[in-house]
Amino acid sequence: MAKIQRRSLKMKPIVAIVGRSNVGKSTLFNRLIGSRRSVVENQPGVTRDRVVADSVISGRDVTLIDTGGMTFGDAGDDIEMQVRLAVKEADAIVALFDVVDGCLAADHQLVRFLKRSGKPAVYVVNKVDSEKRARNLVDFYELGVDFIPISAEHGIGIGDATETLLPMLPNASEQDALEVDESIRFAILGRPNVGKSTLVNSVLGYERVMVSADPGTTRDVIDTNFVRNGRRYQIIDTAGIRRRSRVETRIERYSGYASIRAIEHANLICLVLDAREGVTEQDQRILSLAIDRGRGVIIVMNKIDLVTKLELEQRLSDCRQTFAYAAFAPVLTLSALRRTGLEDLFRTISMVNQNWRRELTTTQLNQIVAAAYEAHPPKLGKNHRQIKLYFAAQQGSCPPKIIVKCNAPGQLPASYRRYLERAIRNAVALDGVPIRLRFTRDIKGQTP
């Protein structure tokens, strides 16, 4: 029996920051990620859409979610639904209160809501940056939970909060070292009603998930293992990622928290588009999310049976133009309802998965880089300095990670970095996968 190759696929715990409006959630979020990612204003309701970013907390890689303010008003409220979705998908919660406002009824509601959710939570009272404000902490004892005083703006107490959060995250043995064997795990992603569930059912040959013409029918991530032509697969169906409604119905603009987790569980993703609508901003967001996380990507134009040949050609042209930054991603056409194009889809999935795991030899890489350098050396750097490339080697796969040593990496133009990536792609079939190309300084090497 052939030995099964196993690779470690890093999984990041999800931490959601929740609380009323204007308690400092975005300020804390920015503090934890080390940059000004969320908009911070001294007025309630600034954060409406979810904001997601990766960070390191007490040595652990995590995905942080900044959320809008909880009001505990209309259950169908757009922002409220976003927060509830974030809590549902999170592994741990940071609940924020405002020492200036004091302990309000909404704070009690938040504590009760989080206790019902069953999710571990760190309770934090923010804006405690003076002795006068610290005296107001006594009001928060009525919540019946342990809390930590902090000032997100001034960085006070952040270490105490993160040290309390750390034990609540899944153990590394449970989450960070998920083993992926030779089976191919691929996630079906896309906006609601583009035919994701129909595609899943067509792939499996039976109705595994409910199919409806109503957008957003699929609410949870659904994993199914199956074998096709002797190869093992796991297909991951996800809830639709919504766009902002143009009507007055209150639906969530982005219900993709489960999709974030699905991306990190998958080797590759299939982004499903509706041939009648073409590419939207949400589609670009999904694809960028998958590329940022180093997953293989395939773009699938579905429902081609509902458009004319001329319309399909226009949609494909628009697709390639919009996704020019991901020109390495294969673009396929199919009809999930009529089960056409599935063989091509599986051939492409197998190819992208193989490329995702690809390991190139050092000799091969140095030959490619040397040929590219000889054909088109970079322009002179500062003080008319010649930038030299010395050595190239692969330092990992899933996706391929390549390091290039040179004498002045900081002076190497972004355009030349892209040129080298294209040279590697042209020489080695790496369709469907991003390449992690890193340049480091080495003044003693020899040109390849």
Image (cartoon, rainbow, N blue to C red):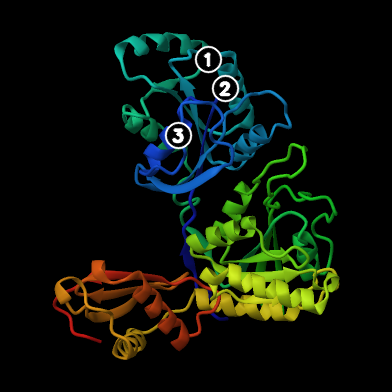
Q: Residue at x 52, y 15 (%)?
A: 144
SS label for mark 1: helix
SS label for mark 3: loop
Mark 2 and mark 3: Cα distance apart in space: 24 Å
Q: How many C-alpha atoms fall within 10 Å of the one at disc 3: few (<14), some, or many (≥20)?
A: some
Read off the residue under disc 1: 143
Identify the mark at residue 111; answer none if there is no mark.
2
Could you tell me residue 89's position as x and y percent?
Answer: 60, 43
Could you tell me residue 161's position as x and y percent?
Answer: 38, 30
Mark 1 and mark 2: Cα distance apart in space: 7 Å
Q: Check whether the beta carbons of the residues at disc 1 and disc 2 lie within 8 A of each other.
A: yes
Q: Residue at x 43, y 73 (%)?
A: 400
Q: Residue at x 37, y 71 (%)?
A: 437
Sequence-wise first label, 2 or 3: 3
Read off the residue under disc 3: 40
Mark in the foreground, 2 or 3 = 3
Quadrant where the N terminus lies? Answer: bottom right
Amino acid type, mark 2: Val
Q: Residue at x 68, y 35 (%)?
A: 78
Does residue 303 lie above or below 83 as drawn?
Answer: below
Mark 3 and mark 1: Cα distance apart in space: 27 Å
Mark in the foreground, 3 or 1 = 3
Could you tell me residue 339's position as x and y percent?
Answer: 82, 74
Q: Can you tell which quarter of the image residue 222 is in?
A: bottom right
Amino acid type, mark 3: Val
Amino acid type, mark 1: Leu
Q: Is residue 261 visible?
A: yes
For residue 370, side relative to residue 20 (left or right)? left
Q: Can you tell which quarter of the image residue 188 is in?
A: bottom right
Does residue 1 lie above or below 91 as drawn?
Answer: below
Residue toward you, 61 or 195: 195
